[in-house]
Amino acid sequence: MSSNTIVRMLAIILLGSGLGVVNKFANPNAPDFVGIYPVFSATDTAKVPEAADEGDPPYISIGEAVGFYNSPSVLFIDARDEWDYNEGHIKGAVNLPFETEDETILLNFMAATAKDKEMVVYCNGADCDLSLYLARTLAAEGFTSVNIFFGGWSDWQLQELPTARSTETDNNNSVEDGGN
Amino acid sequence: MRKLIDNPQLILVLRIVFAGIFLFAAFGKIVDPAAFANSINNYHIVPGSLVNIFALTLPWVEALVGIGLLTGIWGKASAWLTQLMLVMFTIALLIAISNGVNINCGCFTQNPEVKGSLTMDVLRDITMMILVTPLLISKARGFCWKP
């Protein structure tokens, strides 16, 4: 291999990297330069509630949830009530309280969101079935890419992944913002 | 053997085949770098902080190499980079196999549901490494090939 070839190889790598940077800003599917990838075991499996049914939307593990989180087009939905959400939630998640008499938020959300929007629904974790019920409702309304992260808020905190309180800067913390 | 390797027709066919493979592989990754980042992360080899940088840049190097092989511009450098990437991919696959992780190779599709055999992926990459070798050592010229 001549030195000329080596120089050209390096030039191709440099040019490719430059185009990658351009793509980062031009492509809405491009992740940030530095992603969040905690080390999870290869056997990391999804938690499934006792109330699970065969026809439920897919349950995802925390590893898979982080995978979704790194994709800017995926919407995280917090199914807990507003108070819990305000106290702390997955950064960027929108709040769709499931146990509420006022269904306007949910109806508005469903009217404004594409049916094939990729989404991850969660609530508190282990003893909370709100994510399951909300996900079932969304799936029944024709949303095709709903995932349930049953490990939820408690597992997310445990792994010290990005969180926000509603008082902190959180660009996408309300449904009115249109989510991310 | 030497005659075969220096055969311009053979070199042209190999260039077109590899250009096609690498351009095809690059396209899906460029369109959805986030999905490719997940595929990379599933290998548990690249440090988390570097995963996205890899996912953003590697497909473009693949694409440029594909263009280089097709047009012959910087053809030899492109062929060497092809071989280098194949070696890198094969090592990654072997590490994944030895760690016993059950993942999608991420080579051509980023859908995690598509899980082929990693061993078959290794065999494919080794076959490709053998087939790309003539491009590295051939003295054939013509068809815009400027080694």
Image (cartoon, coloured by chain):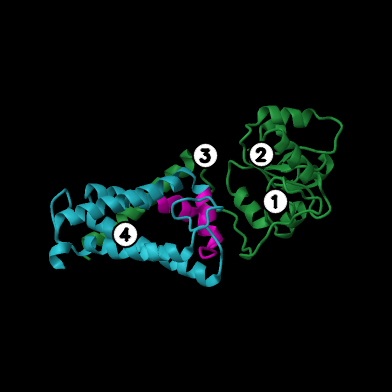
Q: Which residues are magenta?
A: B35-59
The residue indicated by pointer 2 is A171
Name of the residue lying farthest toward the right? A101
**Gap in angstroms between the C-alphas marked 2 and 1:** 27 Å
Q: Which mark is residue A28?
A: 3
Q: Nearer the viewer, mark 4 or mark 2?
A: 4
Residue at the image point whose x is 83% and y is 41% from the top:
A81
Q: Secondary structure at mark 2?
A: loop
**Gap in angstroms between the C-alphas marked 4 and 1:** 40 Å
Q: Earlier in the sequence, mark 2 or mark 1?
A: 1
Image x and y of residue B51, in percent: 51, 57
What is the letter of the cyan chain? B
Q: Secondary structure at mark 1?
A: loop
Q: Which mark is residue A59?
A: 1
Q: Is residue A18 visible?
A: no
**Gap in angstroms between the C-alphas marked 4 and 2:** 41 Å
Q: How many other residues sit within 10 Å of disc 1, few (<14), some (14-19) or many (≥20)?
A: many
Q: Are marks 2 and 3 in contact (CB under 8 Å)?
A: no
A119 relative to A59, above or below: above
Q: Are marks 3 and 1 in contact (CB under 8 Å)?
A: no
B143 relative to B83, above or below: above
Q: Chain of mark 4?
A: B
Q: Is residue B76 visible?
A: yes
The residue indicated by pointer 4 is B81
What is the letter of the green chain? A
Q: Amino acid at mark 4?
A: Leu
Q: Is residue A46 left or right of residue B97?
A: right
Image x and y of residue A1, in percent: 22, 66
